[in-house]
Amino acid sequence: MMRTRPLKVALLGCGVVGSEVARIMTTHADDLAARIGAPVELAGVAVRRPSKVREGIDPALITTDATALLKRGDIDVAIEVIGGIEPARTLITTAFEHGISVVSANKALLAQDGAALHAAADQHGRDLYYEAAVAGAIPLVRPMRESLAGDKINRVMGIVNGTTNFILDKMDSTGAGYQEALDEATALGYAEADPTADVEGYDAAAKAAILAGIAFHTRVRLDDVYREGMTEVSAADFASAKRMGCTIKLLAILERAADGQSVTARVHPAMIPLSHPLASVREAYNAVFVEAEAAGRLMFYGPGAGGAPTASAVLGDLVAVCRNKLAEVTGPGESAYTQLPVSPMGDVVTRYHISLDVADKPGVLAQVATTFAEHGVSIDTVRQQGRPDGVGNEASLVVVTHRAPDAALSGTVEALRKLDTVRGVASIMRVEGE
Ligand code: NDP
Ligand code: HSE
């Protein structure tokens, strides 16, 4: 039975994502109504610049007073696509206080204040859905939160930032340097004018925090995620990776410790073998590889950004929240019952690719090998070659290790830097996915 009284939606923000949400709500109104069991009506649109022309949106719906829109008493669902911490946080809280469920795409806010927002939703018996906050259009939050709720996720490894994947893919396929690839990403509209959040890994770290919380049923905040950006990745690193049959990706990696008593969450560039499914993720696409005890290995792949793809995820949440509203139920809230601590990066165990500039003279290799041994880091392979720039008496030494704790590797590198024969540590890159 179709309810005739519409469910009223407040759209908070009408930029890249919000304008597409509004467009699809209008063009697909009949399908959405049929799927929900009631029409959904765009009841108000809060923006910062009211005079901006917004195609397809009735100017009478536009307001700069988002709080008044939420408080006016007839709104059922708010869609928050403003972004950032404030005013988004206060608006979402206000929505719950006024009996309004919320759909948000705001990874920064959820990574920072997810627990408090979930608590507020719970307190007021309302929904908080945020599929679009991680990996854009890719259904990931709901499959992890609901479809895999009966399984045990042990590891999640993914490419969750489209801008950086585009840059790294260009560097890999064309031999371009970082700046050249970034310029192309900017020209094509992938990278924002200020690309810091993407290239320094903050965006991926926020997504990693959200995914880790869902995967391990514990609380992981942005500050708990170890983060390294990808601005230092060089064409030489790609050449080294190629020699090893690898490429380089900015990865978010979330792991449950072998004893099950803690978790780790990190974002950094890493070499992965070309045979790994994540190696073939090109351009601005995202992909997330989930390893669960019973299900085995699952891969989620698709567009991780952009107005229409992100709006698709927002609208999926809108349908779910509206259905819940009609059924007078709420969907799953935060699940943080395991209360697992997040271990520091030093506890992470992985392999490393270290590139050293050394003096080209007898005994150097032995000295370097001894330093690794003294810190308990076992060497897998060593390759030495004269410096490509022809600098006399100097060589480039590339060491690939077996698996070792990050703390042991840091200690090794610190000691290597103190050796007279080591002129410099050109790069340190983790090797994953083997
Ligand atoms: P935009 O900057 O394009 O849009 C932001 C919107 O919020 C604008 O319409 C702006 O108004 C409005 N706004 C800003 N401040 C206020 C305020 N104080 N009160 C009311 N409205 C305000 O952002 P995006 O659409 O790109 O991103 C929105 C959210 O979606 C963010 O959380 C982002 O992280 C997330 N997201 C974005 C993706 C993407 O590809 N863009 C992908 C996945 C998630 P005005 O139009 O007047 O400037
Ligand atoms: N800047 C983000 C990216 C947008 O490049 O993936 C999607 O969250």
Image (tube, grey):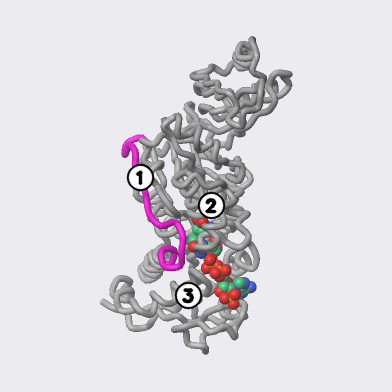
Residue to which mark 2 is pinned: 181
> Regarding mark 1 in the picture, which secondary structure is present there?
strand
Q: Which mark is residue 211?
A: none
The quadrant holding residue 155 is: top left
Q: Identify whether 319 is placed above or below 434.
A: below
In the picture shown, does residue 152 fall above or below 68? above
Indicate yes or no whether the magenta region holds residue 207: no
Q: Position of residue 171 (x, y in %)?
A: 50, 46
Q: For the residue with label 3, is its CB less than 8 Å from the closest atom of ligand 1? A: yes
Q: Quadrant of ligand 1?
A: bottom right
Q: Which mark is residue 19?
A: 3
Q: Amino acid at mark 1?
A: Met
Callout 2 amino acid: Ala
Q: For the residues marked 3 and 1, what is the alpha-carbon distance in whole angstroms?
A: 30 Å
Left or right: 293 as drawn, with respect to 69 = left
Q: Is residue 231 left or right of residue 164?
A: right
x%, y% of residue 363? 64, 10
The residue under the point 51% across, 64% down is: 189
- Outermost residue to the bottom: 60
Q: What whole-number distance in Å separates the C-alpha atoms at marks 1 and 2?
A: 27 Å
Q: Which residue is mark 1?
A: 299
Sequence-earlier tag: 2 or 3? 3
Residue lying at 47% horizontally and 33% vertically, measured from the top left: 432
Q: Which residues are magenta?
A: 293-311
Q: Is residue 144 left or right of residue 391?
A: left
